[in-house]
Image (cartoon, rainbow, N blue to C red):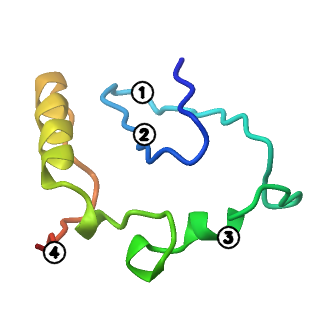
Amino acid sequence: MISPPHMWFQQHFNTAKEPLKILAFKPFGQKFRIAAGYEKLFVSTSAGGHLIEFENEDPKVRQIFVEELKKEGIPLNMPSVTYRR
């Protein structure tokens, strides 16, 4: 279990052959938007929000994920990405 502090950038990866379920506990949601800046969670960082688009993430992140998938014999099922420099 991991519990990152509020507003930390984070990503979720599954390197198992079985599907992964994620249960997120947080003090807000789509129905009760009590946290300041909630709307920024769904806006790209390039537009002033808190969402890192795949093309803006560090390419090393996907490289590590792909390497871990290969160790388990699992194909990458994400679309390809062209990284912005």
Spatial distance from mark 2 to mark 4, Cα to Cα? Answer: 21 Å
Q: Give the quarter of the figure containing the N terminus.
A: top right
Q: Are marks 4 and 1 in contact (CB under 8 Å)?
A: no
- The alpha-carbon separation of the residues under discs 2 and 1 comes to 15 Å
Q: Position of residue 51 (x, y in %)?
A: 46, 64
Residue 75 pos. (x, y %): 19, 42
Quarter of the image for residue 59 reads bottom left
Residue 84's tag is 4
Left or right: residue 29 versus residue 24 is: right
| In contact (CB < 8 Å): disc 2 and disc 1 | no
Secondary structure found at label 1: loop
The residue type indicated by label 1 comes to: Glu
User: Nearer the observer, disc 3 or disc 1?
Assistant: 3
Left or right position of 76 against 30: left
**Distance between the Cα atoms at labels 2 and 3?**
20 Å
Q: CA distance from mark 4 to mark 3?
A: 24 Å
Other-residue count near label 3 (Cα within 10 Å), few / some / many at <14 / 14–19 / ≥20? few
Q: Is residue 51 above or below residue 16?
A: below
